[in-house]
Amino acid sequence: MSELLAGPIADRHAALGASFAEFGGWNMPVSYAGTVAEHTAVREAVAIFDVSHLGKALVSGPGAAAFVNSTLTNDLGKIVPGKAQYTLCCNESGGVVDDLIIYLVSDDEVFLVPNAANTASVVAQMSAVAPDGISITDQHRDFAVFAVQGPRSPEVLEGLGLPADMAYMAFADAELSTADGDKPVRVCRTGYTGERGYEILPRWDDAGAVFDVLLEAITAAGGQAAGLGARDTLRTEMGYALHGHELSPEITPVQARSSWAVGWDKPSFFGRDALLAEKEAGPARRLYGLKATGRGVPRADCAVKLGDTRIGVCTSGTFSPTLKQGIALALLDTASGVKKGDQVVVDVRGRDLTCEVVIPPFVPSHV
């Protein structure tokens, strides 16, 4: 087994008392003060996540934006420079190689932020069809990524002189004053929690100085550092897909309720023909939310039954700190006729757990 990769501020996480686990080939902080406390900090105040394991790649050259638009699912023509967009990189069968955020810098420059483990696959698939003059550069270790999330995140950024009064998915380049001098950062109003938030991208070598300033301001605002445990409970409450769970090379955006991120009228993108055919015919399975009606927590890979018939599988499951009950995301067979409001049973290690079928999110969004 290959050695786990370390982010740029692993020493700071250790000093903060973080527990660690493997994620996408990286050794990542899971929790510091406890997942529930960190989750609550995001919902009620503010917290900072180190997600520097996320991939980064630059597509540049004449017509770079048009090229990206011909490969990835969403319609880049719907946004302008200075805006970011959620999109998908699909395979020929319509399955999702990765979901990613793309930053439209100009017609000739697009910055990609894929998932950690899938960066090489996305870069390779795009490089294979890139025309002369278009370069795709893996910049995985050129930039760090910090997510500042929660209702008090705007005041944290404003107090540090960073742009906060931006539209959702807008980004701007700025400088942050640190003990080690002014550091260039890119600030985007986005996140993965369902709360108002921002993702801040400094240079990899500046990550420590930037993190120190951000954490100090967040702590002063009643917040704290948060790990991947809280990131997972927060995104599950919102019904946000996680690649490898709700999206995968075998799970399409049509099945995962991610069709909103597909530019159906575009003449080309990876997987277009397969996705159009599935959309027309209707998917054989579709993503739903499950809310436990009794004590118990559904987990990923648990079977879902309607009566005695297996109709699907949980893709993610957790205890919701906000609702104080078990919740899950699940792919359910459309032929079963199951719908919102129905009762199903989740097999949790041999014990039946009754759940209500819902359409995510489980809690309101405040982005």
Image: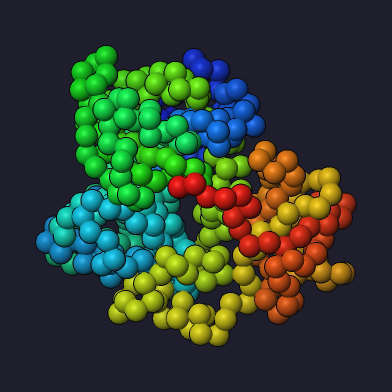
Please name whichever residue, 362 or 53, is drawn nearer the observer in this view of the structure: 362
Q: Is residue 339 visible?
A: yes
Between 324 and 183, the one lying in front of the other is: 324
Name which quarter of the figure residue 136 lies in: bottom left
Classify residue 255 as left or right of residue 180: right
Q: How many marks?
A: 0
Q: Measuring from the top left, give residue 32's x and y in whole percent.
A: 57, 23
Please say which color scheme the image uses: rainbow
> At which x and y percent is residue 121?
39, 56
Asked where in the image residue 332 lies, by quadrant, the reply is bottom right
* Left or right of residue 47, residue 176 in this image: left
Q: Quadrant of residue 288?
A: bottom right
Residue 90 can be seen in this image: no
Up-down relation of residue 273 to residue 220 (above or below): below
Indicate left or right for 305 with 52 as reference. Answer: right
Q: Position of residue 199 (x, y in %)?
A: 37, 39
Height in image: 82 above or below 9?
below
| Residue drawn at point x = 70 percent, y = 44 percent | 323
Q: Residue at x 27, y 61 (%)?
A: 79
User: In the depicted view, which residue is nearer to us: 72 or 345?
Assistant: 345
Q: Name the residue: 55% across, 47% down.
A: 235
For image coordinates 32% across by 49% down, the residue present is 167
Q: Is 61 placed above or below 209 here?
A: below
User: Which quadrant holds the N terminus?
Assistant: top right
Where residue 104 appears, as percent x and y from the top left, is: 24, 55
Q: Is residue 337 above or below residue 196?
A: below
